[in-house]
Image: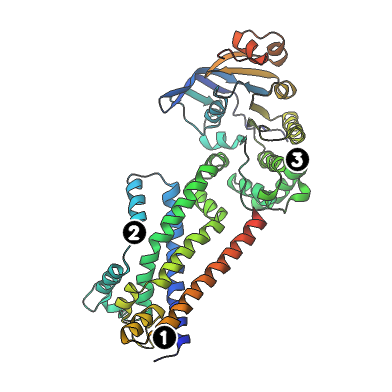
Amino acid sequence: MSATHGILPLALREVRFSAGGRSIIDGISAEIAPGPATIILGANGAGKSVLMRLMHGLLQPTSGRISWHLPGEERVRRGQAMVFQRPVLLRRSALANILYALDLARVPAAERERQAMDALREVGLADVAHRPARVLSGGEQQRLALARAWALHPEVLFLDEPTANLDPGAAREIENVIKAFDASGTKIVMSTHNLGQARRLGDEVLFIHQGRLAERAPVEVFFRQPASAEAAAFIKGETPWA
Amino acid sequence: MHTLGEIVLLSLAVSLSAVLFAALIGLPLGAAIAVGRFPGRRALIVLLNALMGLPPVVVGLLVYLLLSRAGPLGELGLLFTPPAMVVAQTILVLPIIAALCRQSVEDAWVEYEEQLRSLGAHGLRAALTLVWDIRFSLVTAVLAGLGRALAEVGAVIIVGGNIDGVTRVMTTTIALETSKGDLPLALSLGFILIALVILLNAAAHLIKEAAQRRYG
C-alpha cells in the first residue's frame, strides 16, 4: 500500500544538538526528499543515532530547525515509524504487539486484526502470531518490530542500525523486509556502519563525520569516488583520527 | 477465647484487604510518579521512600485520632472495628507498594520510552502499558506490602483494641499471650504466622516464575 500522507520533504536547517556540554550534532543542514532510500553512514559515535532521533522527533535540537512539509504534529507523527537497533516488544503475543500500535494510531478496531495479520505475513511471522513476542528469536523479534511498523503504513521509516545485533542470516531476512518497504513506496532512512548493507539497500548516502554532514552522494558515486578524505578513509576501513 | 482459626482468618482478611486497597492506589501512583515530570518530583520520591519505614504505632495513633469519637471521622463509628484496622494497614502499606512500583516502572521506562513515544503512547496510557508489561515484577512489591501488613502489631492494636472475637488478630494475640505468660500459645501462633507468610510468598514466586517462562 503506498503512503499518501505527504509529510515529506523533511528539512534540517543548521541543526545542532549537544548533551552534557558535548556537541554531538554540529550544524547539519539537509533535505530528505521522498523517493531514494537514504543511508546515514558513519563510524560509531559519529552521531548517526542522535540524528535519526532528531528527525523522528524523539529529541529536540539544541538549535536549528527541523520541519516537515506539512504542519500538524499528529499527522507528522503518524506519517513516520522507527525501528530501533534493539527491538522493544511488549509482554504479549506477536499479534497483540501490532494491535497495540494500531490502537495507538487510532485504526478502527474492526480493521486492526486484518492489518496486523497482513503485516505478520509480510515479514513471514504469520505462524507465530499467537506466540509471546519476548520468547521469539532475536531475528524474529526484529522482524516483528518491522511488521509493527509495516502495519502503520508510514510514509517514512527510520531504521537505526536494525541488523547490528543479528547474525548474517537473520540480517538478510531483515534486509529483504526493508527492500519490500522500499518497493511499496515507503521512504527509507537507515543508519548503518555496514558498507555492504549500505550498497545493497541504499540509493544515496549521507556520510556523517564527528557530528557534521561530510558528504552526500548517490551510492555508486560515493563508493567509487568519495569526495571527502574522511569518507575515502572510512571506506578503506581506516579511521582518519586513528 | 475464640478459636485459633477465627484469629488467623481475621488476620488474613484485614491484611489482604489492606494490601488490595493499597495496591489499587499505590500501583497507579507509583507508575505516575515514575513516568511523570513535575516540580517537586524528586522530593516526593525521597518522601515516598522514607515513608516505607513508617512506624506502625505512629500510623495507629494518627488513625486513632482520626476515628476517635472526637476526631474528624468519629461519626463513622469505625474505631475498634476491623475496617479501622484495614484503614491503618492500608496507610502503612501504601508507601511500600508505591515506592517499589515507582522504582520498577522507572527502570522499565528507560527501556521502553523511545519505542512507546515513537508509537505515540504518552502519559497515563504509557504508564498503564508499563505497569501491565512488568506485572510479574510488581508481584514482589505487593508481597512486600503483604508481609509488612501481616507482621505489624503496633497499628492494629491501637485502632483495633485487641477485642476478643472482634479485632483480635495473630500479632495482637501473640503480644497479649506473651505478656500473660502463655508462651506455648504465643509461640504456636508465631509459627503459624511465619508459615503463612512463607506459603504466600512461595505461591506468588511460583506463579511469577511460570508467567515469566511463558511470556519472557
Residue B124 in sight: no
Q: Which residue is drawn at 74% across and 47% down?
A: A117
Which of the 4 image quadrants contains residue A118?
top right
For discs 2 and 1, the disc positioned in front in the rendered view? 1
Q: Quadrant of the N terminus of chain A?
A: top right
Write down the residue under mark 2.
B51
Question: Three-letter amino acid code at disc 3?
Answer: Val
Could you tell me which chain the residue with mark 3 belongs to? A
Q: Mark 2 and mark 3 in contact (Cβ < 8 Å)?
A: no
Write down the residue under mark 3.
A123
User: Tag 1's secondary structure?
Assistant: helix
Question: Three-letter amino acid code at disc 1?
Answer: Pro
User: Tag 3's secondary structure?
Assistant: loop
Q: Residue at x 75, y 40 (%)?
A: A123
Q: State the separation of the CA atoms marked 2 and 1.
A: 35 Å
Q: Which residue is drawn at 59% across and 61% down?
A: B208
Could you tell me which chain the residue with mark 1 belongs to? B
Q: Which residue is drawn at 64% across and 61% down?
A: B210
In this image, B47 relative to A164: left or right?
Answer: left
Write down the residue under mark 1.
B184
In this image, B79 relative to B96: left or right?
Answer: left
Mark carried by residue A179: none
Q: Is residue A99 positioned above or below B53 on the image?
A: above
Q: Is residue A143 positioned above or below B92 on the image?
A: above
Could you tell me which chain the residue with mark 2 belongs to? B
In this image, B201 relative to B167: left or right?
Answer: right
Q: Is residue B55 positioned above or below A118 on the image?
A: below
